[in-house]
Image: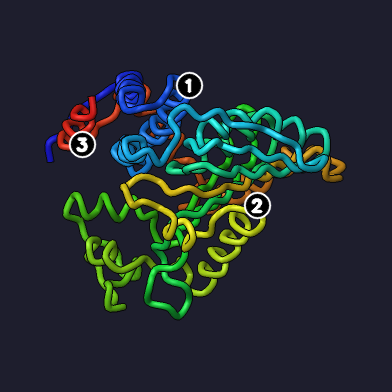
Amino acid sequence: MNEINLSLSQAHDLAVRVLIHNGCNSENATSVADTMIAAERDICHSHGLFRLPGYVASLRSGKVNGNAKPRLERLAPSVLRVDGDNGYAPLALKTARDPLAQCATENGIAAMSLINIHHFSALWVEIESLTEKGLCAMAFTAYTPSVAPAGGTKPFYGTNPMAFGWPRANQPPMVFDQATATQARGEVMIAARDGHTLPPGVGIDARGNPTNDPQDVLDGCLLPFGGYKGASIALMIELLVGPLIGERCSFEAEAADNHDGGPPRGGEVLIAIDPRRFGNTEDPYAHAERLFTALLEMDGTRLPGDRRTRNREKTATEGIAIPQSLHDRIQSFL
């Protein structure tokens, strides 16, 4: 496969230009590009420039407001809400980050709902922005049906990712970001594009049969990780980002979507916690470091997010490589 190399700044500039050319204002375009290139920086290609054609499709179809102006309100002392004005999630998240952190610092814990947004990116970006302020944080969002429920053979849940982060002094935070499916759907799409097979147990075909063929899984559905346990967590996330905040569940998002290839409208829930306000009489951060040290003493272990940290060191100097075919397609949007 032919590839083209770009520096992170070149990739960011390209994404911004494409988004502005196709209907985003500068503020929205920059926020979306920040998130996409953060994924490329961490060598998570399934959430990087690979997503740009979907962003463009939803701008061109008119589904997404490229000039969105998110609006923040406080619903209760520790509950905030951002209405994303039918725009992409990154600007809404940027709008809410500091108010959420301040609310958590004041009260010990705070929650924020994002409604009327289109989320198409990784969750660790918003989590890290809170860990940088000394907070631990959780995030949840849904998508459109692509994962079978326990005992089912048809897509019902979204991949429904969740993320958690814990701050660390003088080193990167501990952050995990994972789908409740066996794999993120974007990873399966890339496997299909590149002609790779999938590990056993990732998904089933349209007839409900196990398959290692990524295209058959895309035509059928993914499976939840851990069987009914992953399916239960997927259901929990549906409730958190749907009924709890008045947004669409995955099956409702699909029914309302125009299927242009871009992200559907949905919601997100963020929870921020100040570890210094929960009663640990010693330093909670130092306590956590003892846990991390004990874990890492075992051969073969690592902390979640360590690979992303190493990848950042690499891409900072070497840049990124994307398929020539994807670069050509992105250039065609200009």
Q: Position of residue 135 (x, y in %)?
A: 69, 36
| Mark closer to the chain start, 1 or 2 | 1
Give the mark nearer the N terminus: 3 vs 1.
1
Considering the image in quadrants, where does the C terminus appear? top left
Instruction: Identify the residue position indicated by label 1 in the image.
Output: 27
Q: Mark 3 belongs to which amino acid?
A: Leu
Residue 33, image x, y percentages: 40, 28
Marking on residue 326: 3
Q: Name which of mark 2 and mark 3 comes first in the sequence.
A: 2
Check disc 3 and report its element: helix, strand or loop: helix
Q: Select label 3 or label 1 by which is in front.
A: 1
- Residue 254 is left or right of residue 239, and the answer is left
- Residue 330 shown left or right of residue 180 in the figure: left
What residue is rendered at 29% in x and 75% in y?
210
Can you tell which of label 2 and label 3 is closer to the viewer?
Answer: 2
**Residue 317 visible somewhere in the drawing:** no
Direction left: furthest residue: 2
* Residue that badge 2 annotates: 245
User: In what element is the residue under mark 1?
Assistant: helix
Give how far apart the Cα atoms at labels 3 and 1 are: 25 Å
Image x and y of residue 202, in percent: 34, 66
What amino acid type is highlighted by mark number 1?
A: Glu
Residue 84 appears in the rendering? yes
